[in-house]
Image: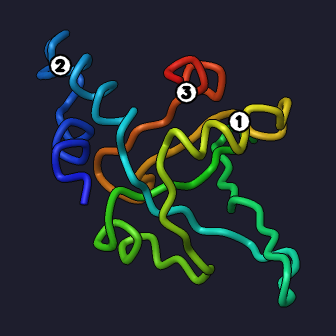
């Protein structure tokens, strides 16, 4: 799952070429990611949830996302999770205002990717 995306995220900035950056964007546009969620309500007819947020040192809140189960295990996530396409995620959060600063992928790895929300939404 997302092998190429994970590979591109893992490239140190000084080694990434402009072509690598373009490939990263293309892989991100078609990615299926794992998103930890907090279940808000669940009954027979309805299932509501919200993405789990993580904060940075500046108190910005990001939606936590993972490329694969190995990355999820590294994060020691104890939430329910769903698989979600980046396109569906963008559609889901486009009207959230400033509730989220951005998205963060594989934040508990040596290499991760954080994207401000407006830049992420502009991909779609």
Mark 3 or mark 2: whose residue is earlier in sequence = 2
Mark 1 or mark 3: whose residue is earlier in sequence = 1
Q: Where 13 sits versus 110, above or below?
A: above
Farthest-out residue, bottom: 44
The residue wearing badge 3 is: 120
Which image quarter is the N terminus in?
Answer: bottom left
Mark 2 or mark 1: whose residue is earlier in sequence = 2
Are there few (<14), some (14-19), or many (20+) residues within 10 Å of tag 3?
many
**Spatial CA span between label 1 and label 3:** 20 Å
Tag shown at residue 14: 2
Q: Which residue is depicted at the point 47% across and 49% down?
A: 85
Relative depth, front residue between 19 and 54:
19
Q: Secondary structure at mark 2?
A: helix
Q: Which residue is depicted at the point 32% across and 64% down?
A: 68
Report the side of 118 relative to 41 (left or right).
left
Q: Secondary structure at mark 1?
A: loop
Q: Where 47 sits versus 4, above or below?
A: below
Q: Where 16 sits versus 113, above or below?
A: above
Tag shown at residue 58: 1
Q: Which residue is depicted at the point 29% across and 51% down?
A: 110
């Amino acid at each position: 799952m997302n092998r190429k995306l994970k590979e591109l995220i893992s490239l140190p900035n000084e080694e990434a070429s402009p072509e690598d950056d373009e490939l990263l964007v293309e892989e991100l546009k078609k990615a299926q990611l794992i998103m930890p969620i907090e279940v808000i309500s669940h009954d027979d007819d309805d299932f509501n949830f919200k993405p789990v947020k993580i904060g940075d040192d500046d108190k910005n809140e990001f939606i936590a996302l993972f490329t694969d189960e190995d990355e999820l295990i590294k994060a020691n996530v104890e939430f329910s999770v769903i698989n979600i396409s980046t396109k569906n995620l963008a559609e889901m959060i486009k009207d959230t205002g400033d509730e989220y600063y951005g998205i963060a992928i594989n934040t508990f790895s040596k290499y991760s990717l954080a994207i401000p929300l407006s830049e992420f939404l502009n991909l779609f």
